[in-house]
Image (cartoon, rainbow, N blue to C red):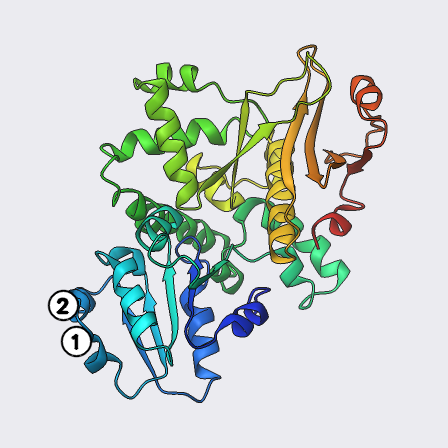
Amino acid sequence: MVIQRRIEEEFRKKLVAGKVNLLVGARRVGKTFLLKKIIQSIDEPYLWLNGDDESTHTLLAERSLQNYKRLTSGISILIIDEAQMIQDIGLKLKIIVDEFPHLKIIASGSSAYALSYKVGEPLVGRAHWHRLYPIAQTELQHYENYLETIRNLEERLIYGSYPEIFQIENFIEKERYIKEILDSYLFKDLLTFDEIRNSNKIRNLLKLIAFQIGKEISYEELGKQLGMSKNTVEKYLDLLSKVFVVYRVGGYSKNLRKEVSKSSRWYFYDNGVRNALIDNFNPISLRNDIGELWENYLMTERLKKNEYERKYKEIYFWRTYDQQEIDCIEVKNLELEAYEFKWGNRNVKVPKAFAEAYPEAKFEVITKENYLDFIQ
């Protein structure tokens, strides 16, 4: 089953001469597959280069008009996959886009930090950015009916949504594949950063985060457990977010002195990766962390939906020091929407302090009965 990705139409619209289209996302989320699908449907000559291939570095090494003219002769589309691996790629792309304005240029990368750092300033005004995530429910809705979606929910909470997972039927093979992604791809990107000295500490840090979904993180406490400084913990988490493993959600505070605002919660871009870290692929009936799985899944699916639909909302959690809390707060144009996530159908009322402080805010409880309206 080939799943149409939500960003494909927008990507095609932006693929014009004189611009660079930058596609970022974790390894194995389907960037290369998507680009090949797009290129193969366009009847134009192209050159495909791979930044993981040493010969690509050699081809692009000489930063001169003569070299790039020779390289791009006879093509109208230039694609550089894993472009962040190439030294001075930003300056090289700037020369190419400025001197050969007839070219349509695509560069992809699995590290937002590395790619944006290397191409950011040279390509100001010359680039369109696109982000690709693991398969979103908003993409799957066109390939399965309601009953199939409900039936597949438990599997997605446990094994996540990397594209190849949908092609694997055996649960043992699904586990093996997700662990391979973690070890061979995600950690591979992390070790390209000069700041990373110890991959075991990175793994242990992620394990601790995996056990604290939906809870505020103390960088100082994590540092004590891992034998590293608070600043190192923060730096590592920042790098982990830039290779699309985890992302940060801050606390919302505007009207009350007792609101928590300086703490952070961290979520995984994929439930399967989270479960691989703690080595737990047990069915939901045998787990005691369904609340964490549900919250991580809903937060991330909502993030995908909002980004693909270009709904640029700020996302927070809300909590007071006397333990009143709400899982998800969305803010746009000063309008607040509050969501509480519950796996069971418990009757939940809006916290009194929140209702009094933000009487105009929308409040909704997201359960198994209504979650599809929230994420697709």
- Image position of 360 with respect to 50: above or below: above
Q: Residues within 10 Å of mark 1 (few under 14, many from 20)?
A: few
- Residue 305: x and y in percent read 64, 53
Label disc, if present, on residue 133 of the rendered structure = none
Label disc, if present, on residue 67 of the rendered structure = 1
- Image position of 111 with respect to 355: above or below: below
- Residue 247: x and y in percent read 50, 38
Q: Quadrant of the C terminus?
A: bottom right
Q: How many circles with numbers are drawn on the protein?
A: 2
Local SS, label 1:
helix
- Residue 124: x and y in percent read 41, 57
| Amino acid type for the residue under numbered disc 2 | Glu
Residue plotted at (36% across, 87% down): 45
Q: Is residue 13 left or right of residue 65?
A: right
Q: Is residue 338 left or right of residue 201?
A: right
222 or 58, which lies in front? 58
Identify residue for label 2: 62
292 or 229, which lies in front? 229
